[in-house]
Image: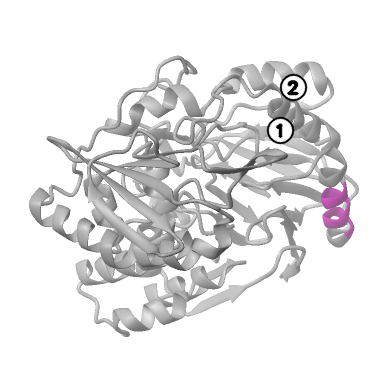
Amino acid sequence: MDWTYLGHAMWHIEAGGLRLLCDPLLERTHHCGVFEVIPHREIDVEALRPDFIFVSHRHPDHFDVASLHRLAQLDPNTVVVTPDPRIVAAATRLGFRGVQQIAPGTLVELDGVRVVTTPSVDPGEWGVMIGCDGAAAWNQVDTVFTGPEHAVAVRDAALAAIGAERVAFAAVRWQPMLEIAAQLGSSTHFPLRAYDQVLQQIAAVEPGSVVPAAAGGSHVGAWAWLDRVVFPVPESRLLRDLATMCPHTALFASQVGATWRIDAHGVAPIVGAPLARVLAGPDPRRFSPLQIPALVDPNPSAGHVPTMRAVVREWIAHELCPGLRRAWTSLGSTRPLALAVELVWPEHTETMTIALDHDGVTVRDGDDDDWDALNQVAGSLLWEVVAGRRGWGDVLLAGALRARSRAYRVDAQGAHALNLAEIFLYYGLDYDASHDRATAWEIDRVLRRSDRPLVAGLDQVHEGLA
């Protein structure tokens, strides 16, 4: 079987006469323009011709609506396989005729090719191990293990299902990313313990060869500063460290367009017709986490600020405040709370304080130095979330949503943290619900752009994604 790396977590696999495509990300940007694939590349999309598309989980760098729509237009008979019912609903809506929901730990027989979906700590995602030509290859995607023993247990169960003795080729999760450390005030120091865990897990699996994968994103434009905080390990350092820990493992760089042939004789790079070519130069990401810039609002949708501001204030009054009021009894507070909101607009910053206690909730303009929790957000991006065009994760990962909490209660035994979400804006709109709405909006948008008839209204998509 031949495995071709196409950037980030995207792989094209030819095995037993079948073509499999993992986590297609065809365009340059994703996460509503927060990230771009590094290095920039051009993919020969029509040459992919997948028989099966595997979408490992719902995060937008793996579940990309625009990419799936493009592939559905090329061949609606391609079968989409995923563990997530939301992706099932979306892929069906986009025009795929065959969509299958398959749980982690499932063996799939595909005409001489055996595929096992390998479980992660998160039950909503999986990796895939593929057996063909007398060899087993494992795409871990974003799989999280509890430790080396867990990684070995998952490996052994998958190998037993496939009928193989060892993993010949592993595309491994490797970057201990600090995705939201700066935004939530956590430490941005080098995460040595997490990195050691990653190295230990890769070594414990004892693969014949390794390619680092699933960490090929770079922040775009106003969010580019996060590249200095999020990615603490360059790939060259990982390969150097693995050479010491795994001296008998063949180590390959994640070169876009590279293909490896994997069979009973081993693993070898091969030269063939490239499915992708690199358009840009070196990786721009450098770990330099000493300075965190002030939040700015670039207004990426070019919205009319007074209109957006009115919508956001209406949402705070009629969605966020009632949500906080409903949560009051579960917070564990014995005194009123002051929740400070900073709305950063392109030309000014607006502050308000939400006062919450057992009698109700009120909002006043202005800040409060004695706040219990503080949320700061780019106003135009909050408007996009409220309007159902973007999910909370897109804003958080852009560094455009930041939070701090000092919410606690004091008794004779000391100070105790309250059960208040650090990002209290979520009480106005649930995190998952925000992404469901944004996905439905994006599906509707790409279908309208393609001039295809809408087979269902937006309300029906909401129901399918619920």
Q: Is residue 70 visible?
A: no
* Residue at image location 30% in from the left, 26% down from the top: 294
Residue at 46% across / 63% down in the picture?
A: 358
Q: Dot 1 surroundings within 10 Å: few (below 14), some, or many (20 or more)?
A: many
The CA distance from mark 1 to mark 2 is 9 Å
Residue 357 quadrant? bottom left
Left or right of residue 408, residue 209 in this image: right
Does 232 sit left or right of 68 as displayed? right
The secondary element bearing badge 1 is classed as strand
Task: Tell me if 204 is positioned left or right of 443 in this view.
Answer: right
For the record, the magenta segment spans 153-160
Whether the residues at callouts 1 and 2 have beta carbons within 8 Å, the answer is: yes
Amino acid at pointer 2 = Leu
x%, y% of residue 27?
35, 47
Where is residue 246 drawn, in percent x and y? 82, 23
Q: Up-down: is 201 above or below 318? A: above
Q: Magenta stretch containing residue 155, yes or no?
A: yes
Classify 265 as above or below 107.
above
Q: Please name the colour scheme applied to the rendered image.
A: one colour
For residue 210, the mark is 1
Of helix, strand and loop, which one carries label 2?
A: helix
Say what amino acid the circle numbered 1 marks: Val
- Residue placed under numbered mark 2 in the picture: 242
In the orientation shown, which residue stands out farthest toward the front?
412
In depth, the one of 75 and 299 nearer the eye is: 299
Q: Is residue 248 visible?
A: yes
> Residue 406, image x and y in percent?
51, 37
Residue 150 pos. (x, y %): 84, 46
Going from N to C along the chain, the mark reached first, 1 or 2, is: 1
Dominant secondary structure of the magenta stretch? helix
